[in-house]
Image (spheres, rainbow, N blue to C red):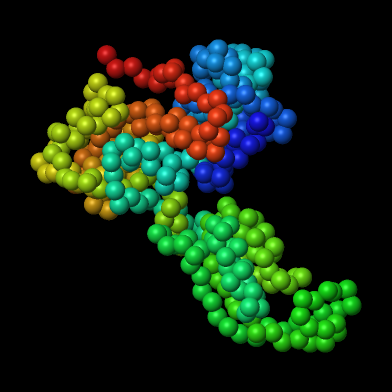
Amino acid sequence: MKLFEITDIIESFAPLSLQESYDNAGLIIGQPDNDDIIGALLCIDVTEEVIDEAISKKCNLIISHHPLIFNGLKKITGQNAVQRCVIKAIKNDIAIYAAHTNIDNVINGVNGKIADKLGLINRKVLLPKSDTLLKISTFVPKIHAQRVRDAMFEAGAGYIGNYDSCSFNMEGYGSFKANDNANPFVGKLNEIHYETEIKIEVILPEHIKNKVLSALIKAHPYEEPAFDIYPLLNNHNQIGSGLIGELESPINELDFFQRLKEIFGLSVLKHTAILNKDIKKVAICGGSGSFLLEQAIRLGADIFISGDFKYHDYFNSENKIIIADVGHFETEQFTKELFYDIIRKKFPTFAVHISKINTNPIIYF
């Protein structure tokens, strides 16, 4: 299959527009329309060993969590690991793709996979994003309103939290006069026409705007459908950083620590002082999540699980929460399984392999 067929599946789950400004998610090496993909290798980091593994498994696509190229390359001379990987991938006709902060920022993404491992229920995004929602208003003849509503719902509009098919509808009168070049659905040329119409308003994430507009226009009976698009300041509760949820039953702190060691494959666990109370509400962030500590405290989490905490970050817990630093790689290791699930759900017979190379640069003695 073509490269774009695989990357489109990932981006429908985690649109590139959701990545942070500093990121470089997406296609790093390859030609989306020309490359025929026979197998994909899934990893956290692209290293020379991972490329060798892809070659041995006859995979001409590597899907990584961390982008191989984060900053611009001015030279490709093999002077460092990134340059050598680029050279080796191109020489062996291997495409490289990354899904990084975009797949961090969807509720069922990296953090959702961690929550699955921990058995969390009642999940919410820890720090929802704002400025990612729009509202579309359109005006439709009364008898066609349901068809247009359904088309926009099918395209992904109208979701608010745990509710779908959400819209506001108000009846009114529209007026227009068609000129000689028009082909009006109702009314006559050069005569003003008044039509009973329904104003339909729906909310949608910005990244599906074009899809929803296309559905609206296709379902609308008018030659020139009228619509308005408004940016919203509301938080998008399905998009953002981190995740918070609850355990089915409270658990003793030390017992929960043991569970963390088993789930994440830890030989040692870094944490702040135990607070001598059961753990029920759990906050998580794959990768580096210290910036979310204050939010985790504000939402009443008993423990915050993430990686890359600095020395002074631990003081900020102030005995209000336990910090469990399980490691950057360790919190993101399940992303390979997430990639596998996304691709296999759509292409069940496609050759997908999970890398066996441990790319964690940190070793514990």
Which quadrant, please, contains the N terminus? top right
Q: Is residue 316 visible?
A: no
In the displayed structure, 235 sits above or below 264; it is below
Where does the image place residue 178, in percent across and percent down from the top left?
Answer: 82, 79
**Between residues 295 and 225, which one lies in front from this camera angle?**
225
Left or right relative to 144: residue 331: left
Where does the image place residue 39, in percent across and percent down from the top left?
Answer: 58, 24
In the displayed structure, 116 sits above or below 196; it is above
**Between residues 327 and 94, which one lies in front from this camera angle?**
94
In the displayed structure, 3 sits above or below 212; it is above
**Between residues 349 and 104, which one lies in front from this camera angle?**
349
Q: Residue at coordinates 15% horizontally, 41% vertically from top-left? A: 251
What is the residue that sits farthest to the front in this orientation?
349
Q: Residue at coordinates 58% horizontally, 68% vertically from top-left? A: 149
Where does the image place residue 32, in percent across and percent down from the top left?
Answer: 68, 33
Q: Residue at coordinates 72% horizontally, 34% vertically from top-left? A: 33
Which quadrant, please, contains the C terminus? top left
Left or right relative to 102: residue 333: left
Where does the image place residue 115, in percent across and percent down from the top left?
Answer: 33, 41
